[in-house]
Amino acid sequence: MKVQKHLYEEMVFILDGHGATSVWQKSGKKHTFEWHPGSLFAVPLNCSYQLFNGQGNVPVRYFAVTNAPFMMNVFHNLDFIFDNDFAFTDRFLAEDDEYFSGKGQLWGRKMSVNFVPNTRDFQLYEWKERGAGGKHVNFDLAGNVMGAHISEFPVGRYKKAHRHGPGAHVTILSGQGYSLLWPEHGEMVRADWKPGSVVVPPSQWFHQHFNSGAEPARYLALRWNSWRYRFAVINSDTPVDVSLKEGGAQIEYEDEERKVHEIFESALAKVGAPCHMGSMVPWCAQKEPGHSHK
């Protein structure tokens, strides 16, 4: 591809193909790193960069999420966006040999990193508050205000419903299932998904993810608001892992409509799969030994 440089953030997820990206500023050395299907990286703000296809007979396909519309609407000057020489050395330092190494720094479930070699087998960490026995990691990519996270949850389970601001592009990495989405006091919409599907919940719509397949379901979400740098316009979001009853944005299992679980059990029955929500949902028909609800 041609060399690009722009004053908006960009996160890139590789769908198909093998290749490399070179990144550089006006001064300092050029960094080059290789990627393959499942890789994720962020282009440092206002750096020059170029993507290369490393195979002569296979096209590269990638999925990118940017904040270009916002930045263009704010400045409404294309020269400022595409022909600006300012170097954000706080976000990208050419002398940092480890910048695209994929190592990063980890604090619990939060990580600062600039390149994720493989999102499909990246190590995740337990997040009990979100339910379903799920695991998670939350990325700060290249110091952006945009962020990303990976979540995974087991067979025969579903996560708790919650809501947040706009712009989360949920890309399915593995597993089969569906999501329910609805505005407050509105009708539910069902979106069935499989690897490669993308679900984008509208702003402040409740949404809930269900694994009705035969393997763990894993997804990558590209969105506003990294854990490190919040974006002021939607900074009023309440915590997504705290109950509505406690001022958060999450619906606990015992507070969800019964039809939510009935739909799930019906979906599992169609494929002959067992439900494993007996220890979490009071009215689940598949009670697990040693668990009771009060």
Image (spheres, rainbow, N blue to C red):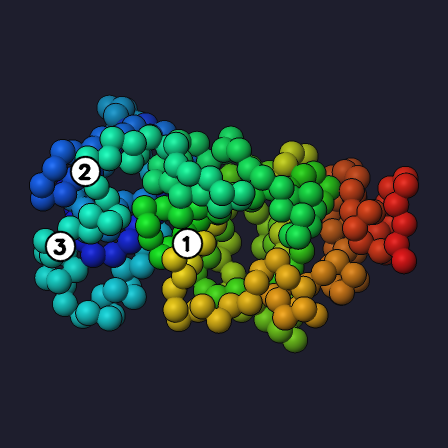
Q: Measured along the vertical axis of the image, is residue 254 above or below residue 184?
A: above
Q: Neighbour class for label 1 at 10 Å: few (<14), some, many (≥20)?
A: some
Which of the labelled discs sits on residue 283, or is there none?
none
Q: CA distance from mark 1 to mark 2?
A: 22 Å
Report whether 246 appears left or right of 236. Answer: right
> Which sits in the foreground, 174 or 109?
109
Q: Measured along the vertical axis of the image, is residue 224 above or below residue 55?
A: below
Q: CA distance from mark 3 to mark 1?
A: 23 Å
Label 3 is placed on what type of residue? Phe
Q: Residue at x 79, y 50 (%)?
A: 280
Please state the horizontal and vertical placement of residue 148, each as a whole percent of the image.
Answer: 44, 49
Instruction: Using the rendered view, name the quadrant where residue 111 is placed.
Output: top left
> Which sits in the foreground, 8 or 273?
8
User: Can the viewer see residue 270 in this picture?
Assistant: no
Q: Residue at x 74, y 63 (%)?
A: 256
User: Can the viewer see residue 81 in this picture?
Assistant: yes
The residue singled out by tag 3 in the image is: 86
Identify the residue at the far bottom of this view.
185
Could you tell which of marks 3 and 1 lies nearer the N-terminus? 3
Quadrant of the snapshot with the C terminus: bottom right
Quadrant of the snapshot with the N terminus: top left
Label 2 is placed on what type of residue? Ala
Label 1 is placed on what type of residue? Arg
Determine whether the residue tagged by mark 3 lies in a helix, strand or loop: loop
The residue singled out by tag 1 in the image is: 228
Q: CA distance from mark 3 to mark 2?
A: 14 Å
Could you tell which of marks 3 and 2 lies nearer the N-terminus? 3
Please state the horizontal and vertical placement of residue 139, each as a whole percent of the image.
Answer: 44, 46
Q: Neighbour class for label 3 at 10 Å: few (<14), some, many (≥20)?
A: few
The residue singled out by tag 2 in the image is: 94
Q: Residue at x 76, y 38 (%)?
A: 273
> Which sits in the foreground, 216 or 89?
89
